[in-house]
Amino acid sequence: MEEDLKDVLYTEEQIKQRVIELGAQINKDYEGKAPLMIGILKGCFVFFADLARSIKLQCEIRFLIASSYGFSSVTSGTVKIGTELDFEIEGRDVIIVEDILDSGVTLSILREHIASHNPASLKVCALLDKPARRQVPISAEYLGFTCPDEFLVGYGLDYAERYRNLPYIASLKPEVYS
């Protein structure tokens, strides 16, 4: 598996420290509130678990499945939402938790969908931002790292459902996914 990697961009320790900082900022911003945190599966699961443990607020944790990649290395432009909202959003403070803000296509559609349910507030927490790939103007209020335009794996990020179990984030060699 490691022979498929080009470079480690963010070490396990760097990620851990940044997730603690993001949790502290959310704790401060939502003090006295009970946010609804919605993780976008599958990529967010490792990040979301660590982030949730760093949040000291009463919060509700839910998940949605959404994808525009499938087994490709580029977005298809078509967003598939695998689960519908079976929980109340209206009047609640909502934080969408995403692994990577890439093209922005999936997140913009999800954000619009959730906003249509009239939350009191709606913010995004993303571990990574890859602005070079942006097709839709969107940003995250809570951001871990801005990353280069490389195909990244590890810490929940995958290529064809592999590499999610790496404890760090690395770039994948182009010959692996091309």
Image: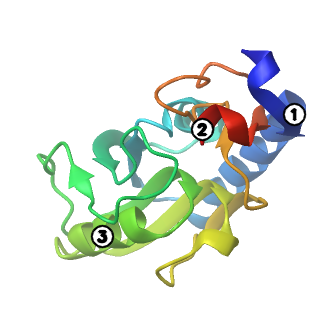
| Vertical arrangement, residue 46 with respect to residue 63, above or below | above
Q: Is residue 95 left or right of residue 172?
A: left
Image x and y of residue 131, in percent: 67, 73
For the residue carrying disc 1, how many other residues have a C-alpha within 10 Å: few (<14), some (14-19), or many (20+)? few
Which residue has dot 1 on it?
11
Q: In the current view of this chain or complex, which residue is farthest to the top? A: 1
The circle on residue 2 is none
**Is residue 113 at all visible to an observer of this figure?**
yes
Circle 3: residue type: Ile
**Residue at horizontal 19 percent and vertical 43 percent from the top:** 82
Which residue has dot 2 on it?
177
The circle on residue 109 is 3
Q: Is residue 97 left or right of residue 154?
A: left
**Which numbered disc, 1 or 2, marks the residue that appears first in the sequence?**
1
Marks 3 and 1, Cα distance to the nearest angstrom? 31 Å
| Vertical arrangement, residue 28 with respect to residue 132, above or below | above
| Element at label 2 | helix
Toward the viewer: 108 or 77?
77
**Residue at horizontal 73 percent and vertical 61 percent from the top:** 149
Residue 55 placement: quadrant: top right
Toward the viewer: 57 or 53?
53
**Circle nearer the viewer, 3 or 2:** 2
Image x and y of residue 22, in percent: 70, 53
Circle 2: residue type: Tyr
Circle 1: residue type: Thr
Marks 3 and 2, Cα distance to the nearest angstrom? 26 Å
